[in-house]
Image (cartoon, grey):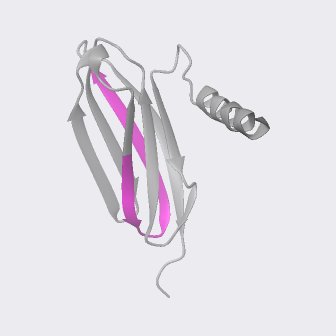
Amino acid sequence: MKRHFRVVLAAGVLVGSMQMTADEAVSITVRPAVAPFRGNARVKVLVARNEANRTLMWEVDGPNYYRSSTMTLDGAASPRSYFFTARELPAGEFEIRVTVRRSDSSAVSGRGSVRVLGGPN
């Protein structure tokens, strides 16, 4: 019984730490913060539901490396969570940007980063 309680408590703490504030329209989490050469970075994006949300664009930008993708959102009916993986990253510092464009021509964005260490000798 105690073990079950601890698992439920830990899950509650994790879920609670992922909640967005009312002022936070986009939240981004990048794991790991430091990766090995040719490693991967997993990105989790949380988007607050809003009827005006129309597109979600993510970008990974670094030395000699750029990837991006755009997807259509269906306003408040869209999912709240999005996941993607940047694969086989070369050495360097990478900025990860997420932008949600809205029907009123406004945009909200979030940023994260990953450092990739090592490389060919």
Which x, y percent locates residue 35? 54, 64
| Image x and y of residue 9, in percent | 71, 31
Residue 95, compared with residue 9, is above or below; it is below
Chief secondary structure of the magenta portion: strand
Q: Percent x, y for residue 74?
A: 22, 20
Q: Residue at x 37, y 17 (%)?
A: 49
Which quadrant is the N terminus positioned in?
top right
Q: Is residue 120 left or right of residue 21?
A: left
Residue 54, quarter of picture: top left
Region rendered in magenta: 84-102
Task: Name the residue nearer the viewer: 90 or 35.
Answer: 35
Question: Where, by quadrant of the figure, is residue 38 drawn?
Answer: bottom left
Q: Residue at x 34, y 62 (%)?
A: 65
Residue 13 point in image, percent of width and height: 68, 31
Q: Name the side, left or right, on which 69 lies relative to 91.
A: left
Q: Does 100 appear in magenta? A: yes
Residue furthest toward the right? Answer: 2
Q: Is residue 71 left or right of residue 27?
A: left
> Which residue does the image show at 38% across and 56% down from the upper left?
86
Magenta region includes residue 17:
no
Identity of the residue drawn at 54% across and 76% down: 118
User: Is 25 placed left or right of 103 in the picture?
Assistant: right
